Amino acid sequence: MFDNLSDKLQRIFKNLRGEGRLTAANMEAALREIRVALLEADVNFRVVKQLIEQIKEKAMGEEVLSALSPSQQVIAIVRDELVKILGSHESKLRFANEPPSVVLMVGLQGSGKTTTTGKLARWLSKNGHIPLMVSVDVYRPAAREQLRVIAREVNLPIYAGLPEETTPADLARSARREATQTGRDVLLVDTAGRLHIDDQLMTELQQLRELLVPVEILFIADAMTGQDAVKSAGEFHKRLGISGVILTKMDGDARGGGALSIRQVTGQPLKFVGTGEKFDALEVFHPDRVASRILGMGDVLSFIEKAEEAIDKKQAVEMQRKLLENDFTLEDFRDQIRQIRKLGPLESLLGMMPNMGILKDLKNVKIDEKEITHVVAIIDSMTPHERANHMIINGSRRRRIAKGSGTSVQEVNQLLKQYSQARKMMKSFSGGFLGKKLGKMKLPVF
């Protein structure tokens, strides 16, 4: 996400650095380019106007123009203003003093409302809550069945309803009673959507709001629709009073204009973003981290949080020992790949790295997930003895491994060559000054 905007802004700042000294003229030129970059990223024109005026007011002062590193100060100003537009700080979910806390999931049809209900239930469960889901969409035949399937996928309960419960109000009322009786502290209500906003939809949602008194009314918007998502969010807020927004399909939106516009237009915070199809692909929206990513500074904090959640600490400590003692086998290599894959798509992880120094070209790396699957399949096709000692893998064994993994002998040879080179490099580290230093250090482990 934000790839196009990030690339353009970084080029603008690079040109500023190349000017030697900042003047009012080249600062004006840079601001014009920033304005164009934001508009091309589908940011709402009113938001662009406000953002440029605020940047200009702070960046055109004598203090910045005559600073020791003026371009760096301009970048800092742009970052601060982006953070303000995005919401200054993370907006946490609210919970009722007395459970269950009711969360209404609202939005247009096709925005990803039902899938996001499942994702949010999983996120709540992972963060110490006991959620219950219910679909009150009595119009679309497959809607309630879809949530039932998702509930099985995330291994969390759903209130299915009784045959006589044929209205949204009946289902919602019974689901809240069920949540209370079974000790569920959050009730997620997946409401009906329409292809467009109409009075019937809004009347129904207003009735549900009055009946359930929700602590949160979350508008689910498809990021791929850009300013249409922002406009719809504004309409829903005007007629219903939403408390926050979840933008779905952010992984497919290279522009990111919706995310940059939605808070300023609606006055309501962006609380989560959907970053993939899997049910763990829902991230809390951190304005400061997103602003840093847009400006090529990376998002190392989110990377660390993902690592802490996915990587086994005992296994990481043992892996550190093996690396220092050069006792790293093909089996260890395969286990590391599996752990890393738990963090999500590798390209999205590379997007969290700062776009500077030796990391500046990482964003251009295209990773073929099929190739990684092939590597795991090759190692899986080896015997435990072969994984422990790669030196015994001769020609006939390589042919057998290739056949068993559905790959070619050349691919097996390539993997073994890369593995051997990695071991040599590790040996040079572990035997030298660096290895001795690392061995004495208590390294942080994710």
Image (spheres, rainbow, N blue to C red):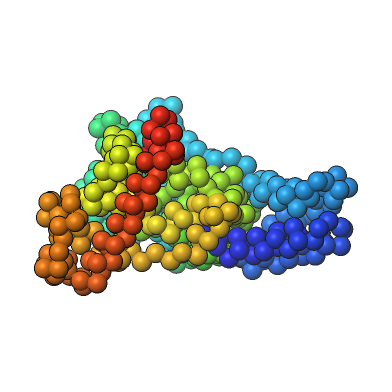
Residue at horizontal 40%, vertical 57%? 346
Q: Position of residue 251 (x, y in %)?
A: 45, 60
Residue at horizontal 20%, vertical 62%? 378
Residue at horizontal 62%, vertical 54%? 295
Tally of numbered tags:
0
Closer to us: 169 or 131: 131
Relative placement, left or right, of 334 versus 250 is left
Q: Quadrant of residue 400?
A: bottom left
In the depicted structure, whether residue 435 falls above or below residue 259: above
Residue at horizontal 77%, vertical 48%? 69
In the depicted structure, whether residue 318 falls above or below residue 12: above
Closer to us: 89 or 160: 89
Visible in this render: residue 88?
yes
Q: Position of residue 32 (x, y in %)?
A: 77, 65
Closer to us: 42 or 393: 393
Relative placement, left or right, of 380 versus 120 is left
Q: Position of residue 29 (x, y in %)?
A: 80, 65
Visible in this render: residue 129?
no
Q: Quadrant of residue 63?
A: top right
Q: Position of residue 284 (x, y in %)?
A: 47, 45
Relative placement, left or right, of 15 versus 243 is right
Task: Name the quadrant of the C terminus.
Answer: top left
Q: Quadrant of residue 19?
A: bottom right
Among all residues in the image, which is located at the extreme top?
Answer: 97
